[in-house]
């Protein structure tokens, strides 16, 4: 039996997410959050004209793969998989970032930064004046990442996460 280990060097591509990515986004959502969005909630995001989502994808070429991407009865797979995703709502000239999550096997490889970069480029192309998000006050790695991209701490939301047990830090980035 072959061990499923991620190669040390993986090239990621960043693109707009589509309905074909929903299942993998849900998997990452469930692995990443204590209160994950449901499949139906995520699926609804893809029909909402105010929502824009992005994925980080990587190429899989696995001759031993026998999963759902099996092509024409062949065991050879030449496919793309989702390593992470992010999204935002476009509301009154501002971008409200809803979720950013990276599959545990891909964390620490710059995927989150790549997603934020792709999303901020899109937010700027939409002529938004600012972007905002909430992050758990104890998620130091995420806070540092957001600060690296110019987000500033603007306040707290009491009892926002984990069924009212954790506060959220509100962060803003002015774009104009």
Image: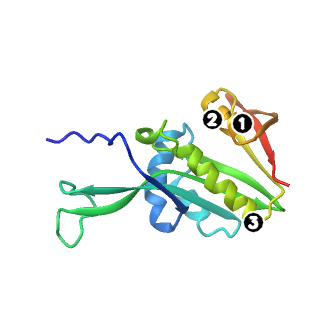
- Mark 3 to mark 1 CA distance (whole Å): 22 Å
Give the SS element for disc 3: loop
Which color scheme did the rendering employ for the protein?
A: rainbow
Number of residue marks: 3
Residue 45 percent across, percent down from the top left: 61, 62
Residue 82 percent across, percent down from the top left: 44, 54
Residue identified by numbered label 2: 142
Residue identified by numbered label 1: 147
- Mark 1 to mark 2 CA distance (whole Å): 9 Å
Residue identified by numbered label 3: 126
What residue appears at the point 86 percent right and 55 percent down from the top-left corner?
176
What residue appears at the point 75 percent right and 60 percent down from the top-left corner?
124
Vertical order, 162 against 64 (above or below):
above
Depth check, front residue: 145 or 154: 145
Circle on res. 27: none
Side of 5 where 42 appears, left or right: right
The earlier-in-sequence mark between 1 and 2 is 2
Give the SS element for disc 1: helix
Vertical order, 167 against 115 (above or below):
above
> Residue 70 sits in which quadrant?
bottom left
């Amino acid at each position: 039996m072959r061990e499923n280990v991620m190669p040390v060097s993986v090239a990621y591509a960043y693109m707009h997410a589509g309905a074909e990515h929903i299942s993998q986004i849900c998997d990452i959502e469930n692995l990443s959050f204590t209160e994950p969005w449901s499949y139906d909630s995520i699926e609804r995001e893809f029909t909402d004209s105010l929502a824009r989502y992005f994925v980080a994808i990587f190429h899989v070429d696995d001759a031993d793969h026998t999963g759902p991407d099996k092509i024409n009865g062949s065991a050879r797979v030449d496919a793309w998989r989702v390593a992470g995703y992010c999204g935002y709502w476009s509301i009154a000239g501002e971008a409200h970032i809803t979720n950013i999550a990276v599959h545990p096997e891909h964390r620490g490889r710059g995927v989150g930064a790549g997603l934020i970069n792709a999303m901020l480029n899109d937010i700027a192309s939409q002529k938004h004046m600012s972007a905002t998000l909430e992050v758990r006050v104890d998620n130091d790695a995420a806070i540092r990442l957001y600060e690296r991209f110019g987000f500033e701490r603007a306040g707290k939301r009491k009892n926002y996460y984990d069924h009212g047990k954790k506060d959220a830090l509100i962060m803003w980035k002015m774009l104009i």
